[in-house]
Image: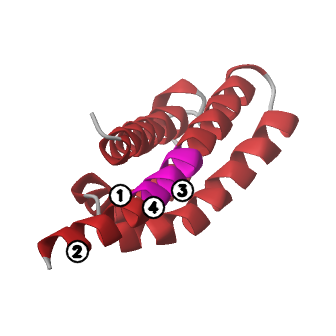
Amino acid sequence: MTRSRGTHLAAAIALTTLILLCLAWELWLAPLRPGGSWLALKVLPLLWIAPGILRGRLYTFRASTMLILAYFAEGTVRAYGDQGMSGWLALAEVVLTGIFFIAAIAHVRASRAIRPATSAGSA
């Protein structure tokens, strides 16, 4: 497995897990209100970038590094302020956003290193 493929896979798994975590958190595990919360809609931006991440589009990887910081901030605030299960889920969100961020940056860097060599070899 090449480095680019490995970072792509790590980012895709982290994003998918983050989407599932956010949905489960706000609908079943520890919603703000019993029976589920409208806060589950926070996954919509993640669902919007998911196809580009899964296809390996570099533009989406670059843009998603800015978007994921909002989820990191939310997780940090809620890990500090929430008690019990919600605090632990927030900590999991922080970890997953960190993994995604690092994998996305590494993927962009690895892809940049591969692209010039590929275009030089085809000339």
26 left or right of 17 in image: right
Mark nearer the N terminus (4 vs 2): 4
Look at the picture and state if 55 lies above or below 14.
below
Residue at the disc numbered 4: 108
Residue at the disc numbered 2: 119
Residue at the disc numbered 1: 47
Mark nearer the N terminus (1 vs 2): 1
Mark nearer the N terminus (4 vs 1): 1
In this rendering, the count of numbered labels is: 4
The answer for how far apart the CA atoms under marks 4 and 1 are is 20 Å
Q: Three-letter amino acid code at disc 1? A: Leu
Badge 3 crowding class, 10 Å Cα cut-off, few under 14, some 14 to 19, many 20 or more, is: some
Q: Assign the C terminus to one quadrant of the image.
A: bottom left
Q: Which residues are magenta?
A: 100-110
Q: Nearer the viewer, mark 4 or mark 1?
A: 4
Residue at the disc numbered 3: 105
Q: Residue at x 35, y 65 (%)?
A: 48
| Label number found at residue 62 | none
